[in-house]
């Protein structure tokens, strides 16, 4: 086989200029990724701490096997869209190793609009599911979401690859025999409630996790009844009564 030799002169002026341009682009990319990881309001950070919940990347750190790679998927999704701060489309997703097994993880970021789902978040979720089906990777969902971002709900259900496709795919993935495991980390409201309900195994965090189609404010508006999130859809309700959740975590 003939050897293809490089004709690039690493000492030339042209090479130096190209190298400098590429280095500047790489530096810009790294800065964009840093912003996507770290740019959260102090109000959101304080609210999360008050709720005794962990940031999404800390959750991933504790979930993944130590010193194993994590290939993040679409970390710059929704860049420049909406208000410019819906980093990663409000979702952290990627392929990692849990208990020695490669899995794909889909985790809502509760510090971005309460983990609500944006149109680009739907596309990102569908991409995660497609990769899982193509490669037969188990999916771990870490759900902490208020459901669809209502001001943009008309863009979430407009086409074949819309929000409803997420749940259709869950049924297909189940039929394929690919495990789907869900951690109920916070509120799972409206559409976000279907994800644990359609998963194979559900771990429900007591005190912070709750599953319901309509939360306490909706119940109050509809019936006048005062009820807490935990009473309406907390871990004890779904582990002891409904059977939606399989394991209670404290």
Image: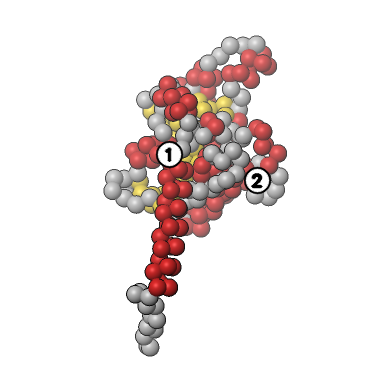
Residue under the point 53% across and 30% down: 114
Dividing the picture into quadrants, the one containing residue 147 is top right
Q: Residue furthest bottom?
A: 2
Which x, y percent locates residue 206? 42, 24
On the rendered image, what quadrant is the N terminus found in? bottom left
Which x, y percent locates residue 60? 38, 40
Q: Which residue is mark 2?
A: 162
Q: Residue furthest front?
A: 13
Residue 173 visible (yes or no):
no
Q: Is residue 64 left or right of residue 41?
A: left
Q: Is residue 222 left or right of residue 77?
A: right
Dividing the picture into quadrants, the one containing residue 181 is top left
In the image, residue 62 above or below residue 243 = below
Residue under the point 44% across and 62% down: 21
- Observer-nearest residue: 18 or 109? 18
In the image, residue 47 above or below residue 191 = above
Secondary structure of the residue carrying numbered label 1:
helix
> What is the CA distance from the residue labelled 1 to the residue labelled 2?
29 Å
Which x, y percent locates residue 12? 38, 75
Which x, y percent locates residue 128? 51, 50
**Residue density around tag 2, few if under 14, some if 14–19, many if 20 or more, within 10 Å:** some
Residue under the point 52% across and 23% down: 233
| Mark nearer the N terminus (1 vs 2) | 1
In the image, residue 183 above or below residue 73 = above
Eye-nearest disc, 1 or 2: 1
Residue under the point 64% across and 20% down: 218
In the image, residue 173 above or below residue 112 = below
Q: Which residue is mark 1?
A: 38
């Amino acid at each position: 086989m003939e050897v293809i030799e490089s004709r690039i002169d690493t000492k030339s002026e042209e090479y130096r200029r190209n190298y400098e341009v590429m280095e500047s682009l790489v530096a810009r990319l790294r800065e964009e990724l840093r912003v996507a990881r770290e740019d959260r309001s102090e109000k959101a950070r304080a609210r999360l701490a008050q709720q005794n919940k962990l940031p999404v990347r800390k959750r991933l750190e504790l979930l993944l096997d130590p010193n194993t790679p994590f290939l993040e998927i679409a970390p710059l999704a929704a860049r420049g869209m909406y208000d410019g701060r819906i980093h990663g489309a409000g979702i952290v997703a990627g392929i990692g190793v849990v208990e020695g097994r490669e899995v794909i993880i889909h985790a809502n970021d509760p510090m971005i609009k309460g983990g609500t789902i944006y149109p680009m978040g739907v596309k990102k979720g569908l991409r995660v599911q497609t990769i899982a089906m193509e490669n037969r990777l188990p999916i771990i969902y870490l759900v902490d979401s208020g459901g669809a971002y209502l001001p943009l709900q008309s863009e979430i259900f407009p086409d074949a690859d819309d929000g409803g496709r997420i749940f259709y795919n869950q049924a297909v993935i189940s039929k394929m025999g690919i495990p789907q495991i869900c951690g109920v980390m916070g509120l799972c409201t409206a559409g976000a409630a279907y994800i644990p309900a359609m998963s194979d195994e559900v771990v429900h965090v007591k005190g912070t996790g709750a599953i319901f189609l309509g939360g306490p404010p909706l119940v109050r508006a509809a019936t006048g009844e005062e009820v807490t999130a935990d009473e309406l859809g907390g871990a004890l309700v779904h582990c002891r009564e409904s059977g939606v959740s399989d394991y209670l975590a404290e």
